[in-house]
Image (cartoon, rainbow, N blue to C red):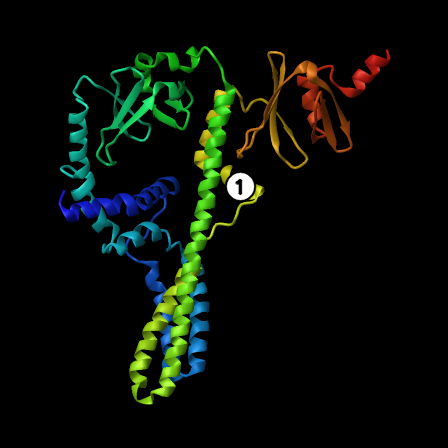
Amino acid sequence: MKNKYKKFVDDYENRVKKYRDEYYKNIVINSSVYNNGINSSFIYLGSFVVGFLILIFLDFSIISYIIAFVAMLILSVLIKFLIKLMKLDSDNNYLNEIRKLGFFSIDDYEKKLKSYVIGNGGYYENLLNELIKEYNINETVRKISGINGEEYYIWTNQHQDKINLLNSKINVRPEVKSIKISAIRYYRLDNQRKMIVLKTDVEEMYFNESALPVFNEMIKMKKLENLITFNPEDYINDFELYMHGMKSSINNKIIQEKKILSSEISKLMIYLIAIGALIGLGYLFEDYKLIINIVSVGVVFLINRQIKMIINSKVTKAGTDDEYIKYFNSNQDCLEKFRELKYSLGISDSFDKVYTTEGACYLTWVANGYFHVFLNMVFFNVVYMAINTSDVLYYKVEGKECLLKLKDKTLAFTSDAAIVFAKVLPNKDYQWLKGYQNN
């Protein structure tokens, strides 16, 4: 690959791709209209112009620098508010990143991207052809489709203990994904969403329902209906590992954002010190004041830029449990993981709901002689109890609470939970048991 092509590919994969994916994902989800020509960064030049004019009118005096700094700070905050209000910042991530690489517009970048990487004759097509040759893929190799338009070659390895997937479209980097059959929990047909869910110990993959015959042929023993053993602990552990990974990524993001903000503040301090030094030099060397003032204007421009960088820095709050709960229960990936967990455990949203006094929702039902309680909320840890009905001693209402007494613990819910327990736990009402025993 020529050096300029290699650099373009490296920049795309390591710097641009995540912003490009986010950009198009937001367009699809929110039907957003993104500004492709006006860079909101230019609007912040207005605060610099005001600061520059203040310096000129007040003859570069000490007070003029103070007033200019305060004016730029106030105007930058107002500009940020207006940009957000008018949604002019919607293109920031993708457009700003490619402008750092010398591209003025998204259209310009997309043309080069198609020519160098994702189009016919581009890097990804050549890479795909190399992989097809390396793995001896021919017309007899089966193909399946993902739910988002992906296409994959699929085959098993020589020992029949792995399945291999190679994405065959050139809009993403071609690579072979090998999955140990022992790591596959199950696959199933989701009739509601008309797709196949392939669950492994680390992820879920989604394919069109036309892939079902291929999976039936290759890994029939992993079909959910064909599983001999049921290990809910495996599914719960998979989910909890994913959620703790999410927490770690958020914490790492917080650390990185704080480092960036600290770096930007340090730069601002350096520029302010430089301005102070230039003011002093202006008084010491009157003959060079014009040159010093010109240099000062350049530093004021940098100060304005740093103010913009600081007020636009994203700093995620360190999460309390309530904040994590709010985030996870609105994150689509987490919700999909949780939905699949409930399906794998045989938990239905139609089960009866009871609530704690803090507002946490639990699903509850009785099956196969066990009383089940499941926390219906996405969190780090899964709360799921299957209690032998003989170990449920009683439930009773005390004030605003309904207490469920088990052999080894007591659970507390809102008082209206008694209506549900009367249905799913007959003969466990405390008052009824008391009367029965007295008789």
Residue at the (34%, 67%) spot, across then down: 45
404 sits left or right of 172 in the view: right
Front position in the image: 220 or 6: 6
Where is residue 70 shown, x and y percent of the image?
46, 72
197 sits left or right of 231 in the view: left
Q: Secondary structure at mark 1?
A: helix
- Residue identified by numbered label 1: 324
- Quadrant location, the C terminus: top right
- Quadrant location, the N terminus: top left
Say if residue 313 shows up in the picture. no
Q: Is residue 45 above or below residue 37?
A: below
Q: Residues within 10 Å of mark 1 (few under 14, many from 20)?
A: some
Residue at the (82%, 13%) spot, across then down: 436
Q: Is residue 326 above or below residue 181?
A: below
Residue at the (62%, 34%) spot, across then down: 360
Specify the farthest residue to the front.
Answer: 159
Q: Looking at the image, how many numbered discs can be counted on the residues?
A: 1
Q: Mark 1: which amino acid?
A: Tyr
Where is residue 40 shown, x and y percent of the image?
35, 59
Q: Is residue 206 above or below residue 118?
A: above
132 sits left or right of 273 in the view: left
